[in-house]
Image (cartoon, helix red, strand yellow):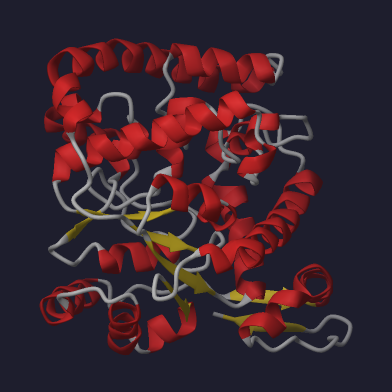
C-alpha cells in the first residue's frame, strides 16, 4: 500500500488519464491494477477539485503574470539538477514549484492551504533512490506537472516501461503531434500563471527534458536565463539506473523491460545533448551559464557566485548566507558511491564518448577481467 503513495504522475484528471490509457491500448499488467485504480481515484479528485479552483481562483490566475523571466536549470537526469534547484531556491527573491504543486497541478492554488499538510502525511519523507528529503514544500520539477496536465511527456515511459509507440512521449518538441505540442505549451503557460499568482517571485524551473526544448522555451519565456549543469557520465548512467530500479518501480503499470530501459537511458542522453548542441546558439549571450556538478560540490560559494555574475543576477550577498545555512543542514548527507565494471565502462564509452571530450571528463581505459572502479 505504501508504494501507492510513491506514484510519479499523480496529477492527471479523468480526461488525461483516459487519453493516456487509450494511447497505450489499455495494456496494463494485472498485478498493477491496484495502481491504476489509485490513479483513477486521484483523477476523480483532481477533476472535481479543479472545478472548485476555476470557480474560486480562475479570474486571478488568468490575470497573473510572472514578475520576471524564469531561470531554467538544464541537465540530464542525475547530473545535480536537484541540488542546484534547492540551492537557488534559497534566494529570497526566487521561488520554485513545490512537490505538492507539481503533483496536483490542476488545483494546487485552491487546495494547497490544506492539501500540502495531507500530502506530507501520505508521501514518503525521503526520495527512495537517494534519501534526499522530500515533503510538500520541497522544490520539484515541473515536468511532473506538465505530464499530469497534458499526458505529453517522456515521463509517460515511467508508467509504461516496455517497448511501445507513443508519439506524445518523445523528447524533441518538433516531433510531437502539433495538437499535443500546442496543448503542452498552453499547459506550461497556465502552470506559470498559477505559480506567479501563488508566489509572486521569480521562478526557478528545472526539468531534464528541457535540454531538448530550447527553441520552445525561448518562445514561451523570452528573456529566460539558463544554467546547464553536467556530471561525470559514468555516475550519471549508474545513478539513473538506480532511479529506474528503485524510484520509478512503484509507478509502473507494466512489467519493466530492462533492456528497453537501458536503451532509453543511453539514447535519451544522446538525443538530448544533440538537440542542445544544435540549439544552444539560440540563447542570447549572457543568458547561459554552464558548470560541473563536481565544482559545485567542492566550491559551492565560487560556483554560485559565477552563476550570478555570468547571468547578471542581483543579490548574491544576501543569497549566500541563506545557502550557507542550508548547506549546514545537509552537511552529513552521504552521496552514493558507484562501481564501474568493464561492461559499464565499455557501454558508456561507446555511446557517450562525445560528452567526455566536450566537457573535459577523462575516459576510463579498459579494465582487467573482474576489476572495477569506484566513483562518487
User: Can you give x and y, in whole percent of width and height, for residue 176 in the image?
Assistant: 65, 34
Which quadrant would the C terminus be assigned to in this image? bottom right
- Most foreground residue, 134 or 295: 295
Name the side, left or right, on which 77 lies relative to 200.
right
Quadrant of the rendered image containing residue 233: bottom right
Name the residue rendered at 27%, 77% in the picture. 312
User: Can you give x and y, in whole percent of width and height, for residue 195 in the image?
Assistant: 24, 41
Name the side, left or right, on which 31 lies relative to 353.
left
Which quadrant would the N terminus be assigned to in this image? top left
Name the residue rendered at 53%, 27% in the picture. 151
Q: Is residue 105 above or below residue 87?
A: above
Q: Is residue 33 visible?
A: yes
Q: Is residue 1 above or below residue 234?
A: above
Q: Is residue 5 visible?
A: no
User: Can you give x and y, in whole percent of width and height, for residue 166 in the image?
Assistant: 71, 29
Number of numbered discs visible in the structure rendering: 0
Name the residue rendered at 54%, 74% in the picture. 230
Quadrant of the rendered image containing residue 344: bottom right
Name the side, left or right, on which 101 lies relative to 352.
left
User: Can you give x and y, in whole percent of width and height, for residue 365 in the image?
Assistant: 81, 89
Q: Is residue 198 above or below residue 299?
A: above
Q: Is residue 220 above or below residue 185?
A: below
Name the side, left or right, on which 168 lies relative to 231.
right
- Most foreground residue, 277 or 147: 277
Amino acid at each position: 500500500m505504501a508504494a501507492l503513495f510513491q506514484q510519479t504522475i499523480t496529477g492527471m484528471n479523468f480526461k488525461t488519464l483516459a487519453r493516456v490509457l487509450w494511447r497505450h491500448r489499455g495494456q496494463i499488467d494485472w498485478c498493477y491494477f491496484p495502481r491504476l485504480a489509485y490513479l483513477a481515484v486521484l483523477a476523480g479528485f483532481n477533476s472535481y477539485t479543479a472545478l472548485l479552483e476555476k470557480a474560486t481562483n480562475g479570474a486571478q490566475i488568468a490575470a497573473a503574470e510572472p514578475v520576471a523571466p524564469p531561470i531554467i536549470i538544464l541537465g540530464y537526469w542525475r547530473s545535480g539538477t536537484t541540488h542546484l534547484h534547492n540551492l537557488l531556491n534559497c534566494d529570497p527573491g526566487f521561488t520554485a514549484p513545490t512537490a505538492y504543486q507539481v503533483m496536483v497541478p490542476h488545483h494546487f492554488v485552491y487546495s494547497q492551504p490544506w492539501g500540502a499538510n495531507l500530502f506530507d502525511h501520505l508521501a514518503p519523507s525521503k526520495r527512495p533512490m537517494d534519501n534526499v528529503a522530500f515533503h510538500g514544500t520541497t522544490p520539484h520539477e515541473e515536468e511532473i506537472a506538465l505530464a499530469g496536465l497534458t499526458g505529453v511527456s517522456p515521463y509517460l515511459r515511467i508508467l509504461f516501461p516496455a517497448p511501445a509507440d507513443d508519439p506524445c512521449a518523445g523528447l524533441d518538441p518538433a516531433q510531437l503531434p502539433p495538437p499535443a505540442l500546442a496543448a503542452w505549451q498552453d499547459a506550461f503557460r497556465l502552470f506559470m500563471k498559477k505559480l506567479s499568482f501563488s508566489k509572486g517571485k521569480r521562478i526557478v524551473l528545472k526539468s531534464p527534458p528541457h535540454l531538448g526544448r530550447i527553441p520552445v522555451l525561448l518562445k514561451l519565456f523570452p528573456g529566460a536565463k539558463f544554467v546547464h549543469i553536467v556530471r561525470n557520465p559514468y555516475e550519471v548512467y549508474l545513478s539513473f539506473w538506480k532511479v529506474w530500479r528503485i524510484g520509478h518501480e512503484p509507478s509502473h503499470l507494466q512489467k519493466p523491460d530492462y533492456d528497453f530501459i537501458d536503451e532509453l537511458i543511453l539514447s535519451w542522453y544522446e538525443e538530448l545533448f544533440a538537440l542542445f548542441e544544435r540549439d544552444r546558439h539560440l540563447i542570447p549571450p549572457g543568458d547561459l551559464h554552464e558548470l560541473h556538478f563536481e565544482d559545485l560540490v567542492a566550491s559551492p560559494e565560487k560556483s554560485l557566485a559565477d552563476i550570478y555574475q555570468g547571468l547578471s543576477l542581483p543579490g548574491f550577498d544576501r543569497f549566500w548566507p541563506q545557502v550557507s545555512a542550508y548547506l549546514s543542514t545537509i552537511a552529513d548527507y552521504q552521496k552514493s558511491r558507484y562501481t564501474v565494471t568493464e561492461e559499464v565502462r565499455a557501454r558508456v564509452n561507446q555511446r557517450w564518448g562525445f560528452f567526455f571530450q566536450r566537457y573535459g571528463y577523462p575516459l576510463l581505459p579498459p579494465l582487467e577481467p573482474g576489476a572495477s572502479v569506484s566513483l562518487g
